Image: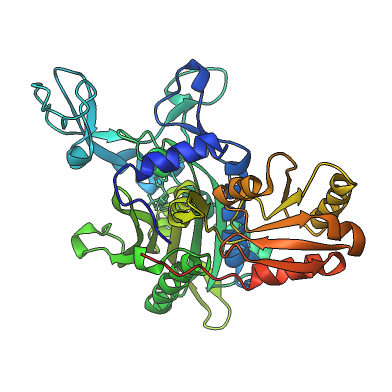
Amino acid sequence: MTQPKDTRFMDTIVSLCKRRGFVFQASEIYGGIGNTYDYGPLGVELKRRVKEAWWTRMVTLRDDMVGLDSAIIQNPKTWETSGHVAGFTDPMVDCKKCKGRFRADKLADASCPERPSKRPGECGGELTEARAFNLMFKTNVGAVEGAGSIAYLRPETAQGIFLNFKNVLESSRQTPPFGIAQIGKSFRNEITPGNFVFRTREFEQAEMEFFIPPAQNDQWYEYWRKERHSWYTDFGIDPTKLRMREHAKDELAHYSTGCTDVEYEYPFGWGELEGIACRTDFDLKRHSEASGKDLRYFDPETKEKYFPWVIEPAAGVDRTALTFLIDAYDEEEVEGEKRVVLHLHPEIAPVTVGVLPLVKKEGMPEKAHAIESELRRARLTTFYDESAAIGRRYRRLDEVGTPFCVTIDGDTMKDDSVTVRHRDTMLQDRVKRAELVPFLQEAIRGWKRPVKKG
Ligand code: GAP
């Protein structure tokens, strides 16, 4: 695989996303709203696949995991207790001249709004002293606005899991070690969002809290570090672009015994894709103290009551979808022309099978529609296309990462066989219609990431 090496690579991804309907600027017709995005028809499928791949591996295939879908707006005491009201802040500075606001610890990554080629403060303006800016969005609940009605949009899904620990324990018959997984929207009033959907103010998280006996902390931390790394590589992410960055002692929260970021080498540098944190018993203990409810677990074997410790793998869905797009992007020359292709894992690709009648006559469209229905009934996502020359149609589907195309031609009309064209190799197989579904299912199971050329 070869990718453009220059800084315009992100522009290429952004423009592909807009052109092919992955991601649009939100409220575009009104001029947008700072770094907020909507997902189009292909983007929504991509994100759905990412979430499904996460949920299947984290919940469906395990017997020590259950799911949860907790509210976005919780009792505000949640966030006082978790420490978010007092401490979920970034240091912020203002430029006295251009009135721009920047994260004091990320000045090197920001640009002056008046002179985008300059860094903050280089427009001749003086920067204020840094002050703490809370990232939580405030809102009012109920018909009366006032101090008593203030609530927050959750800045992480994790706290909803802690609040429900006892409910899940009592209703699911799980016992430590076990996990509660949740996927949902979170909100942070980021001072400087950026790099497309990498950092936005509204985003989806896929988080899991794994509750364990305290003595098993190290063993489960190591387990989840390995498991989460292999999730990315099993779904085709280039392992040479992934690294596990262990936090230094002075980076850790005071209650934490360890934290590792799964980082990816983006076109704009290394960035955090996911954090795997040892949270000890901090959250359950704090919520227990603040609510007066006993959130300890009673171990019937040892007759001991204790607060389970927690290992937390916390990923960003939008960031993961973006990473899959960037990592899969490839340009190559085929017959003197540039072929753009996304080598997405077939279980991540938004469309699995393109269905293409060779010509728009001789009964081929009708046959193609019938075959498409069979594929859909087998839960394969399809896209029917009968316009333009077959080579062009292949290219259009390559560009959005469709791993297989099924072509219906003159022979299909005689012997009910079709051509299956593979996106990565561009090789073709002739397959009997009756064997098409198992053939594609086998090809999905056996998919391997193409080897890098340069
Ligand atoms: N409960 C722990 C927690 O929320 P985090 O590192 O702040 O940890 C977890 O967030 C993941 O959520 C990050 O690794 C990232 O993938 C994603 N994330 C965080 N802030 C984000 C933002 N502003 N935009 C997009 N994704 C974000």
Residue shown at 39% from the left, 27% from the top: 34
| Residue 276 seen in the current view | yes
Image height of 170 relative to 292, above or below: below
Please provide percent x and percent y for residue 214: 41, 74
**Left/right of residue 422 with respect to residue 72 in the rendered view:** right
Image height of 29 relative to 449, above or below: above
Q: Between residues 130 and 56, which one lies in front from this camera angle?
A: 56
Residue shown at 20% from the left, 27% from the top: 112
Please provide percent x and percent y for residue 453: 40, 66
Q: Between residues 164 and 106, which one lies in front from this camera angle?
A: 106
**Left/right of residue 278 with respect to residue 123 in the rendered view:** right
| Residue 199 seen in the current view | no
Q: Dividing the image into 4 quarters, which one contains the N terminus?
A: bottom left
Q: Between residues 276 and 357, which one lies in front from this camera angle?
A: 357
Q: Tell me which corner region of the image, top left, top right, bottom left or bottom right, holds residue 101.
A: top left
Image height of 89 relative to 214, above or below: above
Please provide percent x and percent y for residue 344: 54, 58
